Image (spheres, rainbow, N blue to C red):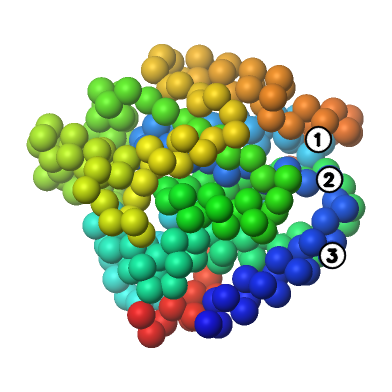
Amino acid sequence: MLLNSLRLETRSAFRENSDAMLLVVGITGPVASGKSTVAACLTQMATDRGIRSFCYSLGEEIRNELRRRGIQATRDAQREIGNLVRAKVSNGAWASVVASRVEEDLSRLCDEPILILVDGIRNRGEVHEFRAFFGESFRLLAVTAPPNVLSRNLIKRRRKDESERTLRDEHELATMIRAEMGEGEPDYGHHVAACLELADLPPIQNDSSEDELRNRVRQVAIQHLFPELIESVAPTDRDTRWLGGAVERMVLFAGL
């Protein structure tokens, strides 16, 4: 109930102040497909053109909630709390937290072109929530990669929240990737494959080098994604920022 009230209030506030030159790009794709590289490339493109950019992450919101509860942020724990909140509140609950944070941050900025990047969209409800909140300012960008590239990237990066046992077992690794795409998942779970189908643009395929991935991102951004926003101001050296920190609104989930 509290989350629903928050969502309605922030939608109303955003629409009343929606004249700003704003583009919100949600990024979806399987684990280790190159989403962070895509976000970094878009951020740099915006910076080169004098556009302020802000990055948000649904995954970081989940990790913040785990820290608040005193739970180690392993991949299994992130999946468990992510699913719990979606099951008990709504499939768009995490997106609602991020969207309301964006609205609050934008209220402190002057009128200027702004690029918002949101990484880690893994459920259709999150896509629908962002579209309902931001309307025509929202675009969903899909990043894909073949299973062998996903496995290679997972093993290469060896993040501390990944299970070493899974990384060493080819079968477990393949099972994890399929579950990420939606195989055997409940409605409130991870459904990246379904999110890919909702993308507003052709997917960016990460099946070559990192330089080639960046080239493909630039092509999509210049040709299809936000040409009007990029060309609206002259290039400057203005910095970008990462907006993170504790998730005050996650107190709404404290009783789950």
Residue at x 33% of width, y 63% of height:
83
Determine whether, in the image, residue 143 is placed left or right of residue 137: left
Determine whether, in the image, residue 139 is placed left or right of residue 57: right
Marks 3 and 2 in Cβ contact (< 8 Å) = no
Q: CA distance from mark 3 to mark 2?
A: 14 Å
Please rate how many residues cluster around mark 3, counting C-alpha atoms within 10 Å: few if below 14, some from 14 to 19, many from 20.
few
Count of numbered marks: 3
- Label 3 secondary element: helix
- Which residue type does callout 3 highlight? Glu
| Mark sitting earlier along the chain (1/3) | 3
Please give the label number shown on residue 157: none
Marks 2 and 1 in Cβ contact (< 8 Å) = yes
178 is higher (above) or lower (below) than 129 = above
| Quadrant in the picture for residue 249 | bottom right
Viewer-side label of 3, 2: 3
How far across and how far down the image is residue 121, in percent?
A: 47, 48
Residue at x 84% of width, y 61% of height:
17
Residue 193 in sight in this render: yes
How far across and how far down the image is residue 169, in percent?
A: 10, 36
Please rate how many residues cluster around mark 1, counting C-alpha atoms within 10 Å: few if below 14, some from 14 to 19, many from 20.
some
Q: CA distance from mark 1 to mark 3?
A: 20 Å
| Mark sitting earlier along the chain (3/2) | 3
Residue at the disc numbered 2? 21
Q: Quadrant of the C terminus?
A: bottom left
Residue at the disc numbered 1? 229
| Quadrant in the picture for residue 48 | top right
Residue at the disc numbered 3? 16
Determine whether, in the image, residue 108 is placed left or right of residue 28: right
Q: CA distance from mark 2 to mark 1?
A: 7 Å
- Which residue type does callout 1 highlight? Leu
